Amino acid sequence: MKVIKPDEKVKITLTINGQKYETEVEPRKLLVHVLRELGFTSVHVGCDDSYCGACTVIMNGKSVKSCTVLAVEADGAEILTVEGLAKNGKLHPIQEAFWENHALQCGFCTPGFIMQTYWLLQEKPNPTEEEIREGISGNICRCTGYQNIVKAVKSAAEKLSQTPYQRQQ
Amino acid sequence: MYPPKFGYVIPENLNEALEFLEEHPDAKPLAGGQSLIRQLKLRQIRPSYLVEIRRLPLDYIRKEGNIYKIGALTTHYTLSKSQIPLLNETASKTADPQVRNMGTIGGVVALMHPATDNFAALIAMDAKVKITSRKQERIVDFSSFQKGRFKADLSPGELVTEIQIPTFEGYKFSYQKLAKRIIDHPIVGVGVLVKLSGDTIEDIRIGITGASDVPAVRAKGAEEELLGKRINDEIIEKAANRAMESVNPASDLVASAEYRKKMVKVLTKKAILNALKR
């Protein structure tokens, strides 16, 4: 049994976008803060209360809200953020689809939407509009009214089905 | 928002977790954390230690005879993909996809939020809760395990480890949820399980969450109205009316007691009709 006292720090290892990172954290530190401090600033702190989805990342293959995961809890996990999507300067099909469909205005929510879309399309490669809307129900956008986001997810699904994209996780 | 300071314990096995929880009554087990971490941030709870149970081998669904045994760490996501009638639907309508990927059935059962989608299924299905401590293991009916709003029959040192429910093979089902946004806790939620023989109702179970001083109730009066009868619009209407007898809702910021009661009727009718259509 490992016991970390309230004032102690603990060493954790995370594999972020395929690269290993070691860092020391207090048990109360949230995953979102660790990711941002390591330079993955696409992961946004929005509501900080697990409603808005701006901090969504893929952890061990599943989308999670990193403001509601402790960093120590994620020890040993594989994390994927938007920074890990583009390869050799070429955008990921989901990123392309968001760009082409004008699925953002201010862009604050976009990384969260893109990571949630990444997970949704893994689960349902060819989702209906209803499935898309349900699939992104944990993410809030205050600019677009969601119409173009739904279009972008649909378009991303088509792109991914046409050109099999090598998934990282 | 940072959570307050706490210590953190990573046990090797269930026994170590139970031992630590028993010796530290102010420690809290951490399962999916989707309610716990929010409570910490809001300083609603100030545990000395969190005990990480989420990696313990309590994430399973086993069918043994005519019982499903569900490990306490089974996520809403896993339940939503399962073959368990009604509970797969209530799980799929719990919170949002990211929260369902982390949140667990044991977590919601221990938290006992007064409006919890899965509870409409658990009460309708005569679920049992297995509670383990270092000294003993006990299995109690979900209906008596729920003591009130945010009150479960759990003592310090005890952990919810398994949920058991009969398989209800050959039943049709439906869960109807009223919420301002689909991702919220329900204002009222009604789950129905029904077994037909021809067009006669052989068995019916109706569970309601969010409308009483305990988190979930059975609508026994409504069930009585339908049991053994041939389906027709009139008895469904009567049953929906009688569902209101079983509830005793409170008023709060989200909805008045009166509104909740009326919605119990509306949702019960919807759930029965929808289940019969499947």
Image: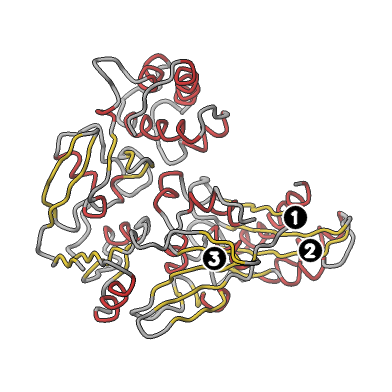
- Mark 3, residues whose alpha carbon is within 10 Å: few (<14), some, or many (≥20)? many
Give the residue pinned by disc 3. Answer: B69
Label 2 is found on which chain of the structure? B
Determine the residue positioned at 70% across, 68% down. Answer: B219
Q: Secondary structure at mark 2?
A: helix
Up/down of A70 relative to B242, above or below: above
Q: Are discs 2 and 1 less than 8 Å apart at CB? A: yes
Q: At numbered mark 1, what does the secondary structure look like: helix, strand or loop? A: helix
Residue sitting nearer the eye, B2 or B255: B2
Tell me the CA gap for discs 2 and 3. Answer: 32 Å
Residue A72 lies, in percent from the top left, at 21, 54
**Classed neighbour count for the residue bearing mark 1: other residues with Cα under 10 Å, few (<14), some (14–19), many (≥20):** many
Front one among B225 and B265: B225
Q: Disc 3 or 1, which lies upstream in sequence? A: 3
Mark number displayed over residue B7: none
Circle 2 residue: B239
The lab-note entry on whether marks 2 and 3 share a chain reads: yes
